Image (cartoon, rainbow, N blue to C red):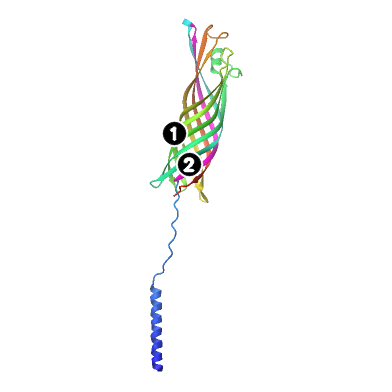
Amino acid sequence: MSKNLLLSGVAGLALFTAGSATAADMPLKVPAMAPVPVFSWTGCYVGGHGGWGWSKNDTSNTFLTSSGPGTQTLVANGRVDASGAVFGGQVGCNYQFAGNWVVGIDGSVSATDIWGSAGDPRGQLIFGGFPTDPDRFNRVKTDWIASVTGRVGYAWGMNLLYFKGGGAWAHNRWDLSDTLTGAPFGERQYTRSGWTVGAGYEWAFKFAPDISMFVEYDHYDFGTINLASVDDATGLNFPSNGNRTTLFNVKQTVEVAKVGVNYRFAPWH
């Protein structure tokens, strides 16, 4: 009987050893790792910006006199340079495709304090100067600028370089001085339309990927507008007698440099 017990013990030990060896040979199952999320610029955003703007206002004053055979035409050219603060907001959407390319649309509105003044070139032409005469000046102030633009850019990770272009609008106020008759033009207000192009660089934060900052430079061109005025030349008219019409043409361009922040929201993936 002891012999049988010995054989049973040896057989059990052999089976246990074989089972342990087989278990040791089995591959261990490693838990699957969650995929690392890939950052994308696809989505919409809303934000604010601030900066500085400069405008160049080239003026051409054409005098058309209506005094019969003595009609004369005089032209006085000048410029009013202006500058001031810019602050506002923007909203838009982006779509990233083909790996690194990004297209989008952006709408922006900025309140501005861009203003400047210069001597009236008409007085300088007729009277030979008065560059500091407070009664003869041209003053302009831009109250706001707005734009709707398309964007195209190239992204690498959380960085985006982009270019933009589209339509633009601006509201201006001109305070035009008297010319020769003592009858000032007074203030003219109008909204101008034109076009804009620009470029910028935007980057998102690793610790807060839904927040991004950007720097941007924009050029605006609002073409030429005509402000006509008929002066009742009963006194210091030139030439004497008759009415005089002044065609005041203004060609305006604006440059804006700004920095801003965007909050970017779904869809993100």
Residue at the location (41% across, 91% down)? 5
Horizontal and vertical percent position of residue 173: 55, 25
Q: Is residue 102 magenta?
A: no
Answer above or below: position of 188 versus 67.
below
Residue at the location (49% across, 43% down)? 45
Mark 2 falls on what kind of element? strand
What span is colored magenta in the figure?
42-67
The residue identified by callout 1 is 166
Q: Amino acid at mark 2?
A: Tyr
Is 269 or 203 nearer to us in this picture?
Answer: 269
Q: Which mark is residue 125?
A: none
Image quadrant occupied by the N terminus = bottom left
Horizontal and vertical percent position of residue 254: 50, 30
Q: Earlier in the sequence, mark 1 or mark 2?
A: 1
Residue at the far front in the pictured view: 266
Is 123 or 39 nearer to us in this picture?
Answer: 39
